[in-house]
Image: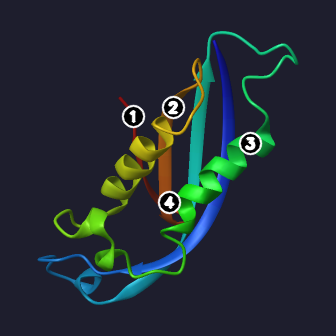
Amino acid sequence: MFELVIETDFSAAHNLREYKGQCEKLHGHNWKVQVVLKAEKLDNLGMVMDFRDVKKIIGEILNKFDHTYLNDLQDFKVLNPTTENLSKILYAELKSSLPKGVKVDRVTTWESDRCGATYFE
């Protein structure tokens, strides 16, 4: 099994509905996202996938979140825009965007240098 690890970031604001504390107020983060992809086989160039292609796919997904108020996005009309839910949504969107044979292993989203959440199946 082979793994690729890609880290990127985006900025967005949110507030946690029904949270009793400061995070109920509007605030923002410079989110860091770590994506781990896996594959059993390499392509004819000896790669799981070209990093350039992976970064493009991730960038297109994150573009809809970057510099937004997450609560306004359709994904978070019902779900609270927690770091956990953000990781799960990014995982699902990435999973449906990858070529055959490449799978998402996990997505970790960091809201600060010391606090993050991982989603995997």
Location of mark 4 (residue): 110
Location of mark 3 (residue): 53
Give the CA separation, mark 1 to mark 4: 15 Å
Badge 2 local density, few (<14 within 10 Å), some, or many (20+)? Answer: many
Give the CA separation, mark 2 to mark 3: 14 Å
Give the CA separation, mark 1 to mark 3: 22 Å
- In primary-sequence order, the first of circles 1 and 4 is 4
Left of 60 or right of it: where is 25?
left
Location of mark 2 (residue): 104
Q: Are marks 4 and 2 in contact (CB under 8 Å)?
A: no
Give the CA separation, mark 4 to mark 3: 23 Å
Instruction: Tell me the mark number nearer the camera, choosing from 2 and 1.
Output: 2
Q: Residue at (33%, 54%) from the top-left corner?
A: 84
Q: Are marks 2 and 1 in contact (CB under 8 Å)?
A: yes
Location of mark 1 (residue): 120
Amino acid beneath label 3? Asp
Q: Residue at (37%, 75%) from the top-left corner?
A: 70
Badge 1 local density, few (<14 within 10 Å), some, or many (20+)? Answer: few
- In primary-sequence order, the first of circles 2 and 3 is 3
Residue 4 place in picture, x, y as percent = 69, 31
Instruction: Tell me the mark number nearer the camera, choosing from 4 and 2.
Output: 2
Q: Are marks 2 and 3 in contact (CB under 8 Å)?
A: no
Amino acid beneath label 4? Trp
- In primary-sequence order, the first of circles 4 and 3 is 3
